[in-house]
Image: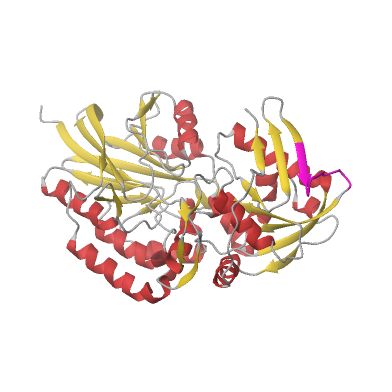
Amino acid sequence: MSGIKKLTLLHSNDLHGAFFPVEKDGVFTGGISLLAGCLNKIRSQKGSVLYAIAGDLLKGSLIDAEFKGISTIEMINLLKPDVATIGNHESDYGLAHLLFLEKCARFPLLSANMNIVGSGKRLFEPYTIIDIGGMKVMFIGLVTKEILLSLKSEELIGNYLNVDDYDRQIATILDSYKTRDVDLTVLMTHIGYEEDRRLAQRLGHDSGIDILIGAHSHALLSRPKIINDIPIVQVGSGFDHLGRFDIEIDTDIHSILSYDYEVLDIDAKHYEKDALMEEVLAAYSKQVEDQGERILTTFSRRFTHASRHQESELSDLFADLMQMDSSFDIMMLGTGSFRGKGLGPVVDQRSFKEVYPFDNAIYMLKVKGKTFRKMCHHFLKASIVSKGADEFYAFSKGVQVIYDPKNDLLEHCRFLNKEIEDEDLLKIALQEFHLNNCEDFLGVSRAELSALDRPVMVVKNDASTYEEMLLNCFEPEPSDSKRIIIKD
């Protein structure tokens, strides 16, 4: 029995700067200080404990945006994670800044499949092996190919980066370490739950992967999903939950004998806030307090945004704002631009930045009706096929689109109550991120979008423009009807 060891493996994902707790039914839930308190409590019970974060540490708060992630990394350091993988939003401040943040982190940031074109040299460490309690635990990191999308604007660097196939990188690493005495192999992915399922299916029963910790899709799985004997886990987003494995390992045969799993609710009923984390969080809050409390406007009510994979009254409102008094006919706004569930009635700079954390240029394009219909059909079809994993859009006023997924038919595509014909000329506006990735997101090439005229930048920074519009006391009107209808 000397080879039998016990390990507690804790995990989080998609933290997105949700530093502050939220009161729910009289109980404070989530927030980084309560999570720190939870980790303190578990670690104080002794035993072998590892804590892993499956990517997207950055973005989503004014504190993160003001310090470009440095504040976030400092506070994550206080959580003392043993390992983390790169998420797609780690590149939002640019690749050079990400490499700087990696040096600030007191834990390894992994990515096995992000490399330099030509040489194939990996940009980050692909794996790490941790010795703990007489066990060797290997962690391998994978990041979604979506990380390249935000880097396309970095013209030189963006062209020299590649994200390899997941399977090949896993096989390469595992083949290299078959002779090593690794007792547990954990694959940390930032590719989304559906892709995790497909990956586990391809890996097979004898892959060598013992556990898959997922991220990116913000799925909250109360129990592991078992595919080919590989348990797949993911715990939503933010600091509201913590996944916990209690594992019994036979180090003589390098195998899991048994495990228990639960998702812990991080709230003030069960855990105390960590005093040092509170102090650091308060210091950063004070530095952004004046800016964060500046009121931009007051709505008559709250405008909601239920999901990034569908239009909402908030996304419609922002599309309307950008189109209002503009030189273009239609604003196509990526609904993934929003990182909160709603905005208002009081809109201060902090809440605005937390809901709309990205800065994008806006480009005006001249296209024919045929091209516009093709774009609409592509993203609507993709949203059904991928079960909401692809990009979605909101339109400004005057557009109505009806899609029949059963027959894969765009039944209607109207503008100002008139069906859009193939030869109609339209001026549409897109965010730079979506223009740069038009082939993937909208099924049209950059050449097609430039056929009538080159794209023209009409807004340099959309977040600043929205702030200015909201400051001008714009009183939004609720949308009286859905602009996008997907038939049952």
Residue 112 in percent (x, y) is at 45, 46
Where is residue 485 drawn, in percent x and y? 65, 37
- Above/below status of 360 relative to 401: below
Q: Quadrant of residue 229?
A: top left
Of residues 339 and 475, the one nearer the viewer is: 475
**Left or right placement of residue 117 versus residue 248 in this view:** right
User: Number of labelled discs?
Assistant: 0
Which one is in front, 223 or 93?
223
Above or below, 24 against 385 in this view is below
Drawn side of residue 203 relative to residue 481, left or right: left
Residue 171: percent from the left, percent from the top?
A: 45, 35
Q: Residue at x 38, y 73 (%)?
A: 288
- As drawn, the residue found furthest toward the right would be 423
Residue drawn where x is 71% and y is 29% of the image: 408
Do we see residue 117 in this rendering? no
- The quadrant the C terminus occupies is top right
Q: Where are the magenta residues, as a range?
A: 412-423
- Choose between 102 and 13: the one closer to the eye: 13
State left or right for residue 268 relative to residue 308. Answer: left
Coloring basis for residues: secondary structure
Snapshot quadrant of residue 176: top left
Residue appearing at x 42%, y 74% in the figure: 291
**Residue 91 placement (x, y as % from top left):** 50, 58
Tell me what residue is drawn at x 63 percent, y 54 percent.
333
The question of residue 415 being in magenta is answered with yes
Nearer to the camera, 376 or 106: 376
**Can see residue 281?**
yes
124 over 263 or under it: above or below: below
Query: Looking at the picture, does residue 210 appear above or below residue 158?
Result: above
Q: Quadrant of the N terminus?
A: top left
Does the magenta portion include 74? no
